[in-house]
Amino acid sequence: MSEKVGFIGLGIMGQGMARNLLKAGFSVCAWNRTSSKTEALVAEGAQAGKSPADVAAQCDIIITCVSDTPDVEAVILGEEGVIQGAKAGSLVIDCSTISPQATRAIAEQLAAKGIHMLDAPISGGSEGAAKGTLTIMIGGAPEDVERAMPVFKAMGKTITHIGENGAGQTVKLVNQVLVVGNCLAMCEALLLAQAGGVDLQKTFDAISQGAAGSWMFTNRAPQIIRRDWRPGFTIDLQQKDLRLVLDAADELGVPVPATSLIFNLYRTLEAKGLGGDGNHALVKALENLAGFEVGKAQ
């Protein structure tokens, strides 16, 4: 692989993504705000950068995968950000989920220094990141997408160039509306099954491969039945995305009543200190209303 890849942000998604780049034969230089998360990757053959600017100075393609809009602005535009070290002609790929408007503003600042940018938010949870089967939605110039395609193929399976900068982020927000809508439907269905006294595993077996099946149901219903709240995606991160959805919907004048309801249900769980649970723990908000739990003997 001729182009060296920088990777900034080794969280719940970034670890698996960076690991798959190494497996694909890329030379990777990584940086994470908590440096201990870099150590495992270095043991597998990556280099450790001293800062985002240091990573950018050493690499041709720089990937960022951090939590929120201010974090992306800090690692790309900050005092030790990518923009301080990147060479003209470098390509920045942001895989975070952030505001489409902020994405366009960041792309403009990078372009002023001759640095290209793609917004390439991802979906598929920590499982998809580990397996290299992520869905990747891309905004930016076609020639930059073509240049980045070997990198995308190392990390994902369904790779779609949507349009110009910001388009990838818009489609990720569309994705999140469907994610949480599916999640609420799954939780209501399991609550009904529990109340009806039917075997939850057999209910899952009967439904999961039919018209009511979904990625959410297949991957998260078994966790709910086992009362396993380990996150593929945390409630706190889900809420950050839903704030972006509600902001975009407000700006565009789009009614999203179900998404707003789900945001407020998640808020009740955050108030109980459950923000680190997986987003499928939405069922706990309904359990609090119902007075019984899924998967527990009544």
Image (tube, helix red, strand yellow):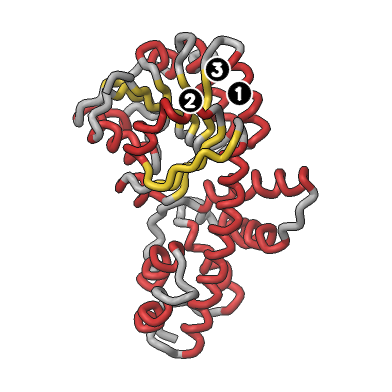
Q: Secondary structure at mark 3?
A: loop
Q: Secondary structure at mark 2?
A: helix
Q: Name the residue at 52% across, 68% down.
A: 284
Mark 2 highlights which residue? 144
Q: Name the residue at 35% across, 71% down.
A: 226
In the image, which is nearer the foreground, mark 2 or mark 3?
Answer: 2
Q: In the rendering, which numbered label is found on residue 78?
A: 3
Residue 239 in percent (x, y) is at: 59, 50
Compared with residue 233, is residue 105 higher up or lower down, i.e. above or below?
Answer: above
Q: Is residue 28 left or right of residue 204?
A: left
Compared with residue 236, is residue 92 higher up or lower down, i.e. above or below?
Answer: above
- Of 157 and 202, the residue lying toward us: 157
In the image, which is nearer the foreground, mark 3 or mark 1?
Answer: 1
Circle 1 crowding by C-alpha within 10 Å: few under 14, some 14–19, many from 20: some
- Of 254 and 54, the residue lying toward us: 254
Q: Is residue 114 visible?
A: yes
Q: In the rendering, which numbered label is found on residue 72?
A: none
- Quadrant containing the C terminus is bottom left
- Quadrant containing the N terminus is top left
Compared with residue 166, is residue 4 higher up or lower down, i.e. above or below?
Answer: above
Compared with residue 30, is residue 114 higher up or lower down, i.e. above or below?
Answer: above
- Amino acid carrying mark 1 in the image: Ile
- How far apart are the alpha carbons under marks 1 and 2? 16 Å
- Amino acid carrying mark 2 in the image: Asp
Q: Is residue 202 left or right of residue 43?
A: right
Mark 1 highlights which residue? 106
